[in-house]
Image (cartoon, grey):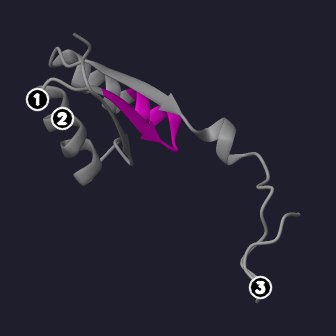
Amino acid sequence: MSQPVALVTGANKGIGFEVARRLAKAGYVVLLGARNPMTGREAADTLRSERLDVCLSNWTSHAARPSPWRRPHRSGLRQA
């Protein structure tokens, strides 16, 4: 039987970090989302030192890409 998986954004500190910790303790494989790779890696290392099953997701490569969508316009979203 496979383990459930959870993605937690902002998991490098505060509430996101604690949510990630509790989900991992409850048996989830937790994907940690963090915009700052260094603090994300530190959070992942901390949780791994507690023998929790976590994996760091690096969103910086996605965040750096320009979005194909512009801001909402009168008629809704318009493709760039």
- Looking at the image, residue 21 sits to the left or right of residue 16; the answer is left
- Work out whether mark 1 precedes mark 3 in sequence or the reverse, and give the earlier one: 1
| Residue under the image location 38 percent in, 48 percent down | 10
- Camera-nearest residue between 17 and 1: 1
Provide the residue designation for mark 2. 23
- Circle 2: residue type: Leu
Q: Quadrant of residue 68?
A: bottom right
* Residue 57, position as x, y percentages in the image: 48, 30
| Residue under the image location 79 percent in, 52 percent down | 66
- Looking at the image, residue 32 sits to the left or right of residue 69; the answer is left
In the image, which residues are magenta? 30-41
Residue 34 inside the magenta-drawn segment = yes
Provide the residue designation for mark 1. 26
Q: CB under 8 Å between callouts 2 and 3?
A: no
- Circle 3: residue type: Ser
Classify 4 as above or below 1. below
Q: Residue furthest top?
A: 1
User: Distance between the Cα atoms at labels 2 and 3?
Assistant: 40 Å
Classify 34 as above or below 74. above
Element marked by disc 1: loop
Classify 45 as above or below 11. above
- Circle 1: residue type: Ala
| Residue under the image location 43 percent in, 26 percent down | 56
* Residue 12, position as x, y percentages in the image: 35, 41
Q: CB under 8 Å between callouts 1 and 2?
A: yes
Element marked by disc 3: loop
Element marked by disc 2: helix
Provide the residue designation for mark 3. 75
